[in-house]
Amino acid sequence: MRSRRQQSGFTLLELVASAVLTSLMMTAILGIVWSTLKQTQQLQRHDTQQASSTTLIQQLRMDLQNARGMQVDPNGITLHGFLARDKASRSVSLSPGRVRYALRKVKSKRILARTSDGNSWDPVWIDFGAISIDSLSFLEVDDDRLSMAETGGLPEVPESFRITVQSNDGTILWREVIHHHEN
């Protein structure tokens, strides 16, 4: 007969119990990692949208401030004024030009795009909803009106107007009252 000696090693029951505990701990850790990763992605997406909307707002504000003529239609806005860009540096030049912001559909996405030559469109905002401009003042008929050459044949930009830009889900990205002729 064998005498009982102290054995070095683990029993099958101890190995199974340690495997179960290890898998429970791994599941808990993976849950925490997954939750953290999901929150990080949401924050990055929010930051990207904030940066995109800030860029959109800066571009639109600059174009609206430099425009002399503006026409709004259901699909977008046409602006005429000192809006031309230097092709090499893409910076604003002080020469007359025309810009159009319009809703474009690419596959299932609604995109706000900008063009200055009518041929190439630069996407400005993806999942775009709507843009509206509400005049808050009416121009009086007087001698200070701009010539048709200055406005590009478009109606003159109102003295004060409210612009509202919305995303596809109805979130207001930008709403501002602009006093165009203010010094």
Image: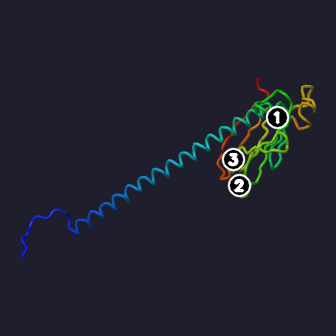
In the orientation shown, which residue stands out farthest toward the top? 183
**Is tag 2's residue or tag 3's residue first in the polypeptide sequence?**
2
Q: Secondary structure at mark 2?
A: strand
The color scheme shown is: rainbow
**Is tag 2's residue or tag 1's residue first in the polypeptide sequence?**
2
Up the image or down, 70 lies above or below 45; here it is above
Badges 2 and 3: C-beta atoms under 8 Å apart? no
The residue wearing badge 3 is 166
**Is tag 1's residue or tag 3's residue first in the polypeptide sequence?**
1
Q: Type of residue at label 2?
A: Lys
Up the image or down, 92 lies above or below 72; here it is above
The residue wearing badge 1 is 158
Q: Residues within 10 Å of mark 2 (few under 14, many from 20)?
A: few
User: What label does residue 109 carry, if any?
Assistant: 2
Residue 71: percent from left, percent from top: 85, 41
Relative horizontal placement of residue 85, taking residue 1 as reference (left or right): right
Task: Name the front one of labels 2 and 1.
Answer: 2
Relative horizontal placement of residue 118, taking residue 164 as reference (left or right): right
Viewer-proximal residue among 124 and 142 = 124
Residue 167: percent from left, percent from top: 67, 49
> Which quarter of the image is occupied by the N terminus?
bottom left
User: What label does residue 177 carry, if any?
Assistant: none
Q: Secondary structure at mark 1?
A: loop
Relative horizontal placement of residue 1, taking residue 57 as reference (left or right): left
Task: Name the front one of labels 2 and 3.
Answer: 2
Q: Type of residue at label 3?
A: Gln
In the orientation shown, which residue stands out farthest toward the front? 1
Q: Residues within 10 Å of mark 1 (few under 14, many from 20)?
A: some
Q: Type of residue at label 1?
A: Pro
Residue at position x 77%, y 49% from top? Answer: 103
